[in-house]
Amino acid sequence: MPLPPPPPPLVQILSGATVWAPTGPLQGQAVALRKGHILAVGPAEALLRAHPGATRIALPGGTLLPGLVEGHAHVESLGALDRQVDLAGVRSLKEAQDRIRTWGQDHPEGWVMGRGWDQNRWGGRFPGSADLAAATGTRPAFLERVDGHAAWVNAAALAAAGIGPATPDPEGGRILRDASGQATGILVDAAMDLVHKHIPKPADTEREARLQAGLKALRAQGFTAVADMGIDAVGLAAYRRMATANALPIRVFAYLGHDHALMLRELKRPRAKQLSFFQVQGVKFFMDGALGSRGARLLAPYADEAGALGLWATPPTKVARDVALTLRAGYQPAIHAIGDAANRSALDLLAQAAKKGRSELPPRIEHAQIVTAEDAARFGQQGVVASVQPVHCTSDHAWTPDRLGPDRVSEAFPWRRFLDGGALLAFGSDAPVEDPNPFVGLAAAETRQDPEGNPPGGFLPDQRLTRAEAVHAFTAGNAAALGRAKDMGSLKKGAVADLLWVQAPLADLTPAALRTLRPGRLWVNGVEANLGK
């Protein structure tokens, strides 16, 4: 695929900042760039003597880092946020209704769409269709939960889909019902599609605009690359158009959604080995749902819902078949697994699939939130990437013990166990499920506390990480997880010139100061980028 505008032909030397090298922060060093790659790292004066015609970029202190890699995001959904009701952070049903009502007044046509609500923020009770109708009237509405694994719909939406007391739960999904068998208005996992497929599809130009907005939002946070998890055929075509037009602001590693026909068509193509601005990297699979909506598959029932084990979002046999196909084709499987049963099943099927064919790329398990100690050790033993999102821990800590109970809450977010077991750790945010701000993610990784300092001492503090470990997971760890350890994620000779400068001594900031940090300057492929959206 073509690249964006080529980098300057002459040498550029960036000096004046602490350089975050693979060995740690280095004082008095500079970085020389040429033709989109790092030419050298060394003392500034030595580099200037070696390249007397170089353009010197003097940085006023601060820290020069490798460009950050967003290891797990949903780019189009992130780009659509400004086009929908934003319910992130609402702390009461009334506040949610007020936002929905205001948005509906400002956007009077079509379905009411949105996302971001979390019933745990207003006492734990799921809202219902009547609650939503109070804000939308007879307009159909579809509002995704913060994790994207449940939808809140009104009676108009239920009617559009023909959902009634006799409608069975689909495989991998659940229609929540009241005592009389009527749908309450909450659809979990695969049940969401019963309504979603009736929503008018956006035009291809709108899909492309959402992707562009999402990529620019990530660039504004300091990211130079993203793993986009779960694109469909329309999104894939849009990305390819954007790449051909040199319109991608950061690098995109795309994972196809688990569509067997799409897989068969695309995986026939040899995987691109040369780094570019767009590449199909692998396939995203779903084992289960999310813990917040009790869709995560557990080994024993939920502590706060008797008998409930969660869901298999996709039958494990089907995942096993297509994971093996992905590996044989030389691509990378990325398996969503949140509950301890889902993680165990994912590890088991990866072990079996490896016997039938391997890829050069390591398999990944996405989220890996609830994992037994025995299975956490298997990540390193089997060479499986633990792709985790630190902010999930600090967003969910208040109610995770209720879901799991005291005997197995220690299974939650076992980052230190992954590292101690030799696993590769890759960080992301799951945006727009969480704020993509990487500095918030770094603070979450080392404190396991939310911005208000809760819980005191951190949630299961023995699983905290150091700042260096967390930065590694957002840079070199993600690069290695993508099979690009040689040319991405580090400030070293030969790597691509993707760099981030922040105007602060990153190694010395308190977690509170870290959360307020913002990107200062950014280079993608040696070209300085506009950090505005």
Image: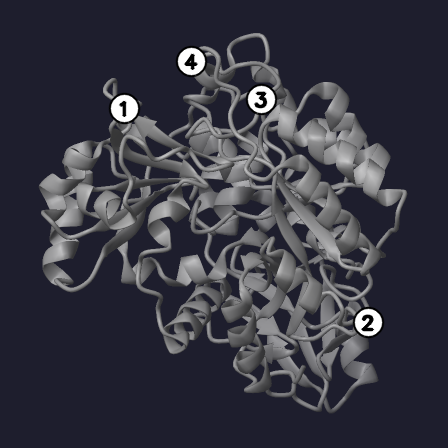
Q: Determine contact: label 1, label 3, CB under 8 Å.
A: no
Mark 4 belongs to which amino acid?
Asp
Q: CA distance from mark 1 to mark 2?
A: 63 Å
* Residue that appears at 56% across and 61% down: 223
Mark 3 belongs to which amino acid?
Leu
Nearer-the-camera pick, 70 or 245: 245
Label 1 element class: loop
Q: CA distance from mark 4 to mark 2?
A: 53 Å
Q: Which mark is residue 304?
A: 4
* Residue that appears at 52% across and 16% down: 404
| Label 1 neighbour load within 10 Å: few <14, some 14-19, many 20+ | few
The residue to which callout 3 is attached is 298
Nearer-the-camera pick, 332 or 43: 332
Q: Which mark is residue 371?
A: none
Which residue extends farthest top? Answer: 407
Q: Which label lies toward us, 1 or 4?
A: 1
Between discs 1 and 3, the one toward the N terminus: 1
